[in-house]
Amino acid sequence: MRRTMSRVGALLVVITLMTGCTSTAKDPTGPTPTPTVKSPSPTPTPTDGPADLSDPELGIVFETAPDLHGDAADAYDIIALFEHESWSTMTTHQISSMFSTIASTEVQAQIQTAEDWSAEHGAVYGGVLHVRVDNIVVNGDTASGSVCENYADATFADTTRTYTPEEAGFGQPWLMNMTLTRVSPEGLWRVMTIKENGTC
């Protein structure tokens, strides 16, 4: 099993699993369409400081946020929300409706492609994902930031067996760089691009 990256941000891991390790048996019914469901997450709103979106029930833990305020804190929150919804999508195979608000059309297409692949190959994700969001830089109506995703406590499986993070290609934390654009004067940002940038 090896990781074949072409994923996007937190979900950026979805397109990955089990290429080269899947069973030769094929499901005669073909892949199951992935539904889009309403996310239980709150609508993102500007805050005085970064929000902690750690969710023990979902299995995602955010490291302590840097000291940010204003636009930088708002951009941080959107990146963190994106990571939260990505992990939710990966573990439930139900694409979060929140992406229509916080992700560009290009990123949404990547998420759909990744989730379709995951569903077709019977990929199952679980355990706990540890996330660090930092390096937030705001320049007018654009922003950038980085995400370090640590899958050491996550679980991986397909229709044939379970895999350790190392076997699944997630033995080291993965670094993702994101760019954002402001889409409302109230401070709502949207993730426009995501690029894998090695380990962290």
Image (cartoon, helix red, strand yellow):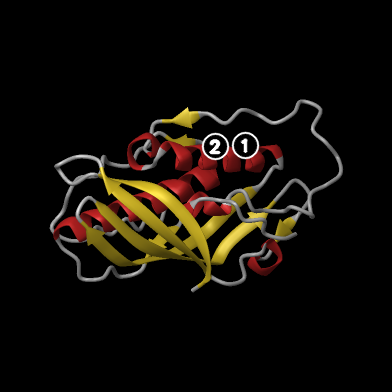
Q: Relative to 132, is 140 above or below? A: above
Q: Relative to 200, is 158 above or below? A: above
Q: Label 1: state its secondary structure.
A: helix
The image quarter containing residue 50 is bottom left
Q: Amino acid at mark 2?
A: Gln
- Which quadrant of the rendered structure holds the N terminus? bottom right
Estimate the x, y position of residue 33 in percent, counting from the top left: 61, 28
Circles 2 and 1, Cβ within 8 Å, touching? The answer is yes
- Identity of the residue drawn at 17% across and 49% down: 46
- Identity of the residue drawn at 74% across and 28% down: 30
- Identity of the residue drawn at 33% across and 42% down: 41
Mark number, residue 3: none
Q: Relative to 16, is 38 above or below? A: above
Label 2: how many Cα within 10 Å (few below 14, some 14–19, many 20+): some
Q: Which residue is mark 2?
A: 112
Residue at the farthest top position:
29
Estimate the x, y position of residue 184 in percent, counting from the top left: 19, 40
Q: How many marks?
A: 2
Q: Amino acid at mark 1?
A: Asp
Mark number, residue 116: 1
Is residue 95 in view from this perspective? yes
Horizontal side of 77 relative to 152 (left or right) equals left
Estimate the x, y position of residue 143 in percent, counting from the top left: 28, 56
Horizontal side of 105 relative to 173 (left or right) equals left
Estimate the x, y position of residue 119 in percent, counting from the top left: 65, 38
In front here: 198 or 122?
198
Q: CA distance from mark 2 to mark 1?
A: 6 Å
Residue at the farthest front position:
140
Horizontal side of 74 relative to 97 (left or right) equals left
